[in-house]
Image: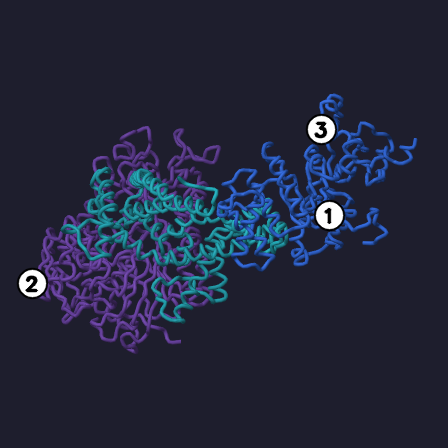
Chain colours: A purple, B blue, C cyan
Amino acid sequence: MTLRHMLTGAAALALLAPAAHAERGSDGQVNVLYWQAVSIMTPYLSSGTKDLEAASLVLEPLARFGPDGQLVPYLAEDIPTLENGGISEDLTTITWKLKEGILWSDGTPVTADDAVFTWQYCTDPDGGCAQLPNFGDVASVEAVDPQTIKVTFSVPKPYPYGPLVGAQSPLIQKAQFANCLGVAAPTCTEANTKPIGTGPFVVDDFKANDVVVLSANPNFRDPEKPAFANMVLKGGGDAASAARSVLETGEFDYAWNAQVEPEILTAMEAAGKGKVVSAFGTLVERIQVNQTDPDPALGEERSTVKHPHPILTDENVVKALSLAIDRAILIETGYGAAGQMTCNLVPAPEYNASTNNDWCKTRDVDQANKLLDEAGWMMGSDGVREKDGKRLSLLFQSSTNSVRQAAQALIKQDWAQIGVETELRNIDGGVFFGGDPGSPDTFQKFFADVEMYANNFDGTDPEKYLGDWVCSQAPSIENQWQGNNTSRMCNPDYDALHAELGKTAGQDARAKIAIELNDMIVNSPSFIPLVHRGRVSTKSNALGGVIMNPWDSELWNAADWYREKS
Amino acid sequence: MSDAATPLPRAAEPLLRVEGLKMHFPIYKGVLRRRAGAVKAVDDITFSVAEGETLGLVGESGCGKSTAGRAILRLYEPTAGAIVLEGRDIAHLEGDALRTLRPKMQMIFQDPQASLNPRMTVGSIIAEPLDEHTRQSRAARRARVTELMDAVGLNRTFVNRYPHEFSGGQRQRIGIARALALNPKFIVCDEPIAALDVSIQAQVVNLLEDLQQQLGLTYLFISHDLSMVRHLATRVAVMYLGKLVEIAARETLYDRPAHPYTQALISAVPSPNPEIEAKRRRIVLKGDVPSPSNPPPGCAFSTRCPRVFDRCRIETPPLYDLGGGHRAACFLAEPAARAA
Amino acid sequence: MFAYALRRLLFAIPTLLVISFIIFALLDLSPGDPTANLPLTIPAEVREQIRISLGLGEPFHIRYVKWLEQFFVNEPLHLIEQATGWSFGEGQRMRVISWQTRSPVTDLILERLPQTLWVVGLSYLVGILIAIPIGVISAYRQYSWFDQFGTLFSMIGFSAPTFFTGLLFIVIFSVWLGWLPSIYDTNLRVTNAQTLWLQIRQMIMPVMVLALFNAAQLSRFMRASMLDNLGQEYVRTARAKGLRERAVILIHVLRNSLIPVVTVIALGIPTIFGGAIITEQIFRVNGIGQLLITGIQGADIPLVQTLTFMFAVLIVLFNLVADLLYGMLDPRIRYE
């Protein structure tokens, strides 16, 4: 990433912001609805999206990600790069400069000590910090001077924008949290629910899992912002009624996460009171294809790399399965504005997305049948293909969720057309994603042939996410079934290239490798992309300044929100 | 009602006159609950009760005698007929007109347990009619309650007790005290002793007799117990399947019953006189009482009558006057038949 | 009666201990995991650390004893300290802390109680006020048009689930007519006539949805009880006394018919405290019911355990209250 890139990004954002027609607090109250109610205002003790986003109104990081995935400086003066010397040549340190004169909402100045304290707070072994991965490989955070923060990594970090960047790791005030380290962390109810921050709003009243009342931060660095004097963050209910309260009754200005059947949402939007807004991050609904044999006859060794899958290691078979799926119907019925076509594992940001894999976007049953014929799977008398006396029959599992079950049923139909028999199964999400090594039903144990779920990564850099696909990440008895390579793909070339990514700095160079890695996965028999899922929220026509952002909190620019004059 | 219809040759107007009283209960059937017929619980009965006398009303259970008693006291709205109390037809009075009449006529119920509100104390049970119908002071009311309790032989300290704390006989005394509260003239005793132990029965009957003498009460005494009726009543009426089959002075009825049904009933009563008892021949009736919703044609008793003949199954016999106030509804009692 | 109540309360203690153990064991055996709902981006080691920080590293019996201590010793002591300003002993006592919100469970419950009592409690009251006249008139005029209508009403009220009636109400009154708010504002403070009006407006729909449901059940019960008593001999006695019909019905029949209904009402009171999960969700009343359901969804075991146990206490308590009420209302019943 070059400085020029960043400056143009910032300039574009500045243009998007409303002309300075408002003064602080002149637009009254804005009502925001989070149907998953906010539980806590400290992102370090919760990683629920709703909590992170609520906290983003109050707590700010050094830099946030903009809607295009580029970094935007918040508390920092600018974004450190190799070019501007902010990142050391050996890639082990990054040095941030704080903006001048930034105050906490209680009027005290923000200093580098607060950043150091934030790191200590999250890395305390007894604290159970949920954002620990953001501080991975951090050897130390030092206050070089009150305005300068130096983060030192124990290994070279080609992508050093993890600590204190993005909605997951904002700065907290040392003075307020000093007695809340380690085991004391959960007992600091006052600090956890009413943190002192630098953001546009401060918490006036907090009712856990119900409602948060905020008011404009008198010490916010931009004296004209926020335009709203108050914000009410109400919680509870379900997604459909949340969308209704914006689109139909107009009681609320903004409702987060409109996970509603597309046709219902369209009907609500027709009332003309508001709009559906969406943004696409990295979340991809996919089918993971088991490369190992889940046959129960294998006992202990079922679904382990010792036994390759008898059918699904053939890339032509998996390609045929992928070609047979009608993705357009899946999107139309299940996702609407929240879904778009993709054939990638890393679909965004744009500079990281591959453009080489568009073949999956059009359904081609003939080609799929041809591929299966060529692979030796011949149509049997009952419409199911066979090879060497073995039927092409798959067990397809997913978590319990109406959209997923509908998609499973559609895919089963699609596959029946190419002579593939599918048995469907769904497992409660708490169990499926629960990771309990004692349960046979976790997505990691993968005692099935194919499984559907969605996954994404935080921020814009896919290194760690792509790292889930290396051989050593395959779940096994040895690692308590905790690896993330659920497909158990193992390609030494891939592992080598991923290691290369770990040594490469610079956005463009990293993007080139990321795209190559993405293509290797997409063309392997271990992955079938389905839908690129976005965030969908609803906003009232009376609310201006909303820019959906898939890379950071949806409320990332709440300081710029204003009342639309009608 | 017209004088021409008055069949009773009495000089003085009786206290109560019942003329052609009918009490039919409709039966509804089907989805739309259409009226499908009626239970003729009381079907055209006529009699009168003179002041100060006790008319016994007897019959098997289900014959309609209790219904008749309740209809006379206007606890039901009669289907047809006249009920003349002290010269005024009360058969179709309603609302306040009927309510203000209540003090004159009262009822003593069969089941003393069920007929007393379980959540009221004895005092309030007895006092309630006083509250409703008189304007007495509290003290006067309380005095009246204790007076009544004394009159029926209840310990006056029990005034704040609840009905369940009393024995059956005591409860019936409460019921009697309650009925007497407003100085009624006419009391319907609806099987007042049927639910009591035999040892208690006599006490209650004696109490009723004493009260009648002291207060000059007139009773309609409904019972299936013929020996008790013989003891108490001055005249006796016999009902079968909603109809009056015979009515006569006590001695006449017990000595010379005219109707085969009455004969059968009386034959079942043991006599205290060993000579008569030795000669007593019991007439056993066969079969069950027909349903009042579907009575047999002709004489209602024809299905069980030991002396039935063809005419009985076709024609309904009227009440033939046998003289001396003795009347019976049987063709055998027809003057022509007797002459033959 | 007092001795009886005391004896019953003493017997309740072992019962409640067993219940608390069963709840604890069931929650422990259930497959929920407090970290299951975290994004997949959180690595397993971090999940494990979070679990340990929540106390899940300890064996089952230790956790149970700890909960017992927190709930039965620390929480009451805390409440007393809060109320009186005294302090017992030294240092921080561990209170029952919710995993999801990291705040003390009893504080959460106390925070939620007002709206639950207002909305669910009021709906119970309104339900009773609707049900009793309907039940009385239906029974008094059995098979009349009113009775038929009452039967239809209670059948609909009973069989239409609150998530349906609630939604229907919102669509009609909030979306089409725009008369009432569809979202309950728990922060509204009633300070003057205007805020009172706002409070009434926002309570109408949730209260009515629940009240109709409650009334449907209770009115049937009332009707049956009235019919039972209307056929009793003492009613005929009352009429024979020459009482006004109104007095017969209200003083004699209604009072006797209310005895079993009052018992049913008393037994239903714990459900008020339990909130009404669905209705609270629909209208975002965010009371106890919503607290429970978010606790369940988030596998917040201390919260669910404490709430469920408190419901158990209330149920045991109100069973006793119902029994004692019965004894007070019906002179035929005596407890020794």
Question: Which element is circle 1 on?
Answer: loop
**Whether labels 3 and 2 share one chain:** no
Q: Which mark is residue A144?
A: 2
x, y percent for residue A458? 25, 54
- Describe residue C292's horizontal placement relative to residue A98 as left or right: right
Q: Amino acid at mark 2?
A: Val
- Name the residue: 79% across, 38% down: B248
- Circles 2 and 1, Cβ within 8 Å, touching? The answer is no
- Circles 3 and 1, Cβ within 8 Å, touching? The answer is no
**Quarter of the image where the N terminus of chain C is located:** top left
- Name the residue: 20% across, 64% down: A196
Q: In this rendering, is residue C256 above or below C202?
A: above
Q: Which mark is residue A242?
A: none
Which residue corresponds to mark 3? B269
What crowding class fits label 2: few (fewer than 14 Cα within 10 Å), some (14-19), or many (20 or more)?
Answer: some
- Circles 3 and 2, Cβ within 8 Å, touching? The answer is no
Q: In this rendering, is residue A243 above or below B154?
A: below
- Chain letter of the residue carrying label 2: A
- Chain letter of the residue carrying label 3: B
A9 vs B83, nearest the viewer: B83
Q: Amino acid at mark 1?
A: Glu
A387 vs C54, nearest the viewer: C54
A4 vs A251, nearest the viewer: A251
Which residue corresponds to mark 1? B51
